[in-house]
Image: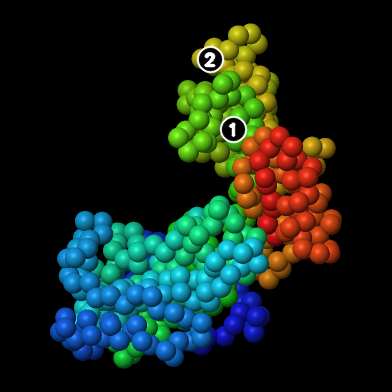
């Protein structure tokens, strides 16, 4: 493995080994190699303690904060007792961000005793916007915890700790933290984990795998493009692309449903509104049955799956649809009953399907994955062109601030000078914050 910085070479689109989860599970299970030598638990504990004083890390700014030997059975995961292992924690590039909050890539590496090590290394991918180091026990489907099967495992926090921040999305306002979450944290953690493995076992892993789902799946794809030499195999489960499109579309849908939720809107203990009464499950099922009745057969097979989306979009208008067998219109012509949806519900569905728009009807993000690429932050996804709005939200997007959020791209025209992040925050607050909560957009 080499440890070149991503800027030092062109992006490679080579996908080294991209498995489906099931194929990968079979493949990696067949690649085991016994550890070369064995040590007693006492030796293992001593070797573990020595890692606390290791100094020649590939990244200079590395601090080890824990090097602890855990005896077999002292902890368990998924009902499986964890083996003797060395638990190492640390932080790389600890610093204060431009927003004044502390940042750095915190990581954990768990190393089974040399006698138990199968010679392999697994990186356990992150989830959501990260913000905490998950226990590096080796979450990998039915192989979990892989630590108990002899794997050395690493995990990390994406370069920020939510406990240190006022909001989980705060880190998007620090450019380095955004890059850390995009790809840098998994890069430096990989290098550091392999260094620790080499120090602990006196040899490199003979096979290395990246396993992740959701954000971890995205990280797997980023690994394949930016760091194709790091891993012999990658399991990229349900990779999340274009998080901005997903986030904005979700917020837009919440807005549409919230607008028709009967007042007073109840709230969960955490303050989030309960929007379920606007569109309860029975009404959701009614809509689904109408959609299937209109579109299932358009792909040539009535199988409960709509494969011809374009034809469906051209044909199906929930405001005018009537069930062919009963003639019942989907939209109520009178009072709301269990057999129809109110015009307000139909309108909300059409708004959601239309996707986020600004106040003059301009498209911000296309729904259903057809993202407007100008608004995709490719840096966050591991690509090369960090130029567009990230649309990350700090604060409460409800109320007037939420309305202004969808006009935010207009502010992008002011991005050529000065500190864009602060400017957008200030502008949104100045224009929209009279009755709403503070809101800022990250870059
Ligand atoms: Ca079908």
Query: Which residue is outermost to the top?
Result: 334
The CA span between labels 1 and 2 is: 19 Å
The foreground one among 163 and 367 is: 163
* Residue located at (44% from left, 79% from top): 63
Disc 1 designates what residue? 295
Helix, strand, or loop for circle 1?
helix
Other-residue count near label 1 (Cα within 10 Å), few / some / many at <14 / 14–19 / ≥20: many
Q: Relative to 48, is 176 on the left or the right?
A: right
Q: Does ligand 1 reach within 8 Å of label 1's beta carbon?
A: yes
Whether 43 is drawn above or below 151: the answer is below
Find residue 339 and name its label.
2
Where's residue 32, x and y in %? 27, 78
Residue 315 occupies quadrant: top right
* SS assignment at label 2: loop
Q: From this viewpoint, is residue 204 visible?
A: no
Whether the residues at callouts 1 and 2 have beta carbons within 8 Å, the answer is no
Q: Residues within 10 Å of mark 2 (few under 14, many from 20)?
A: some
Residue 78 percent across, percent down from the top left = 26, 56
Q: Is residue 19 above or below residue 282?
A: below
Q: How many marks?
A: 2
Quadrant housing residue 252: top right
Q: Nearer the viewer, mark 1 or mark 2?
A: 2
Residue 177: image quadrant is: bottom right
Percent position of residue 216, x then y: 47, 62
- Residue 266 appears in the figure: yes
Q: Residue at the spot x=44%, y=91% of the render?
A: 56
Residue drawn at x 59%, y 56% as measured from the top left = 170
Q: Earlier in the sequence, mark 1 or mark 2?
A: 1
**Residue 374, image x and y in percent?**
75, 57
Of residues 328 and 385, which is closer to you in this image? 385
């Amino acid at each position: 493995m080499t440890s070149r910085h991503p800027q030092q070479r062109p992006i490679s689109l080579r996908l080294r080994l991209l498995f489906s989860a099931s194929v990968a599970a079979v493949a990696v299970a067949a690649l085991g190699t016994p550890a070369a030598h064995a040590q007693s638990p006492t030796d293992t504990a001593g070797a573990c303690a020595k890692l606390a004083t290791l100094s020649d890390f590939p990244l200079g700014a590395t601090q080890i904060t824990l090097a602890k030997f855990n005896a077999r059975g002292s902890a368990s995961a998924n009902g499986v007792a964890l083996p003797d292992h060395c638990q190492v924690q640390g932080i790389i590039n600890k610093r204060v961000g431009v927003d004044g909050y502390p940042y750095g890539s915190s990581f954990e590496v768990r190393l089974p005793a040399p006698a138990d090590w199968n010679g392999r290394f697994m990186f356990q991918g992150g989830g959501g916007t990260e913000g905490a180091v998950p226990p590096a026990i080796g979450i990998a489907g039915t192989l979990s915890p892989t630590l108990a099967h002899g794997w050395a495992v690493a995990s990390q926090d994406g370069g920020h700790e939510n406990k240190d921040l006022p909001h989980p999305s705060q880190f998007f306002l620090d450019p380095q933290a955004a890059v850390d979450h995009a790809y840098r944290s998994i890069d430096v953690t990989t290098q550091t984990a392999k260094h620790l493995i080499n120090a602990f076992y006196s040899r490199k892993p003979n096979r290395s795998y990246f396993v992740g789902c959701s954000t971890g799946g995205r990280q797997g794809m980023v690994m394949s493009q930016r760091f194709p030499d790091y891993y012999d195999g990658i399991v990229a489960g349900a990779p999340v692309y274009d998080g901005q499109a997903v986030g904005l579309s979700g917020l837009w849908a919440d807005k549409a449903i919230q607008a028709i939720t009967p007042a007073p809107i109840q709230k969960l203990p955490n303050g989030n509104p309960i929007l379920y009464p606007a569109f309860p499950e029975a009404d959701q099922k009614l809509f689904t049955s109408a959609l299937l009745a209109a579109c299932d057969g358009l792909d040539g097979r009535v199988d409960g799956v709509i494969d011809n989306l374009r034809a469906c979009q051209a044909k199906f208008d929930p405001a005018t649809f009537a069930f062919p067998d009963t003639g019942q219109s989907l939209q109520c012509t009178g009072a709301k009953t269990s057999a129809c949806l109110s015009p307000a519900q139909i309108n909300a569905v059409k708004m959601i399907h239309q996707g986020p728009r600004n106040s003059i009807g301009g498209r911000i993000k296309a729904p259903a994955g057809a993202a407007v690429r100008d608004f995709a932050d490719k840096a966050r996804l591991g690509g090369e062109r960090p130029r567009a709005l990230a649309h990350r939200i700090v604060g409460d997007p409800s109320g007037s601030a939420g309305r202004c959020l969808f006009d935010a791209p207009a502010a992008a025209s002011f991005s050529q000078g000065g500190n864009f992040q602060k400017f957008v925050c200030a502008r949104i607050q100045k224009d929209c914050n009279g009755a709403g909560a503070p809101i800022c957009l990250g870059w």
